[in-house]
Image (cartoon, grey):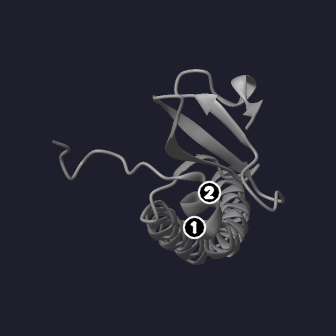
Amino acid sequence: MSSSSDPRLFTLDEANALIPVIAPLLEVLQQQLQELRTKHQAAQRLAEAPKSGNGHRLQEETEVRQAKDEVERLSQQFQRAMEHLQSYGCEIKDVDTGLLDFRGMRDGEVVYLCWRAGETAITHWHALDSGFAGRQPL
């Protein structure tokens, strides 16, 4: 008997059927991550910049606070997008490269059906403990 917390097991056909749905979601996630990194770096530069001593300190502090608030907002938006994508049952391994895994069965063993952004279908698998380096053709 499996509990509701057990990861879903996909057939190859089920996982492949999700590719057209999740590929655009992953693309949005990648864009959000890039924007988050850019805003975070800008906020850091702003926070670390030398402060003027000519009465502009309040304005500078306001700008730093607004930049940090924007980073927090983008971070929460990114987290919600991650959770939405994961709700389909896939495991996000690397947002930058667009690497996703689906748990499935192969020769009686639970394995990862491995997909990477740009691929039209899942054509590889790997053991749960081998990672991308252990990727093998189906």
Q: Position of residue 87 (x, y in %)?
A: 42, 65
Q: Earlier in the sequence, mark 2 or mark 1?
A: 2
Image quarter for residue 20?
A: bottom right
Q: Which residue is mark 2?
A: 47
Q: Position of residue 41 (x, y in %)?
A: 71, 56
**Left or right of residue 114: residue 108:** left
When the figure is inspected, residue 99 is found, relative to residue 133, above or below; the finding is below
The local crowd at label 1, few if under 14, some if 14 to 19, many if 20 or more residues have their Cα within 10 Å, is: many
Instruction: Please state which amino acid type lies under the numbered disc 1.
Output: Val
- The number of numbered badges drawn on the structure is 2
Image quarter for residue 15?
A: bottom right
Residue 50 appears in the figure: no
Quadrant in which the C terminus is drawn: top right
Residue occupying image coordinates x 62% and y 68%: 17
Residue occupying image coordinates x 57% and y 67%: 64
Q: Position of residue 37 (x, y in %)?
A: 69, 58
**Contact check, label 2 and label 1, Cβ < 8 Å:** yes
Q: CA distance from mark 2 to mark 1?
A: 6 Å
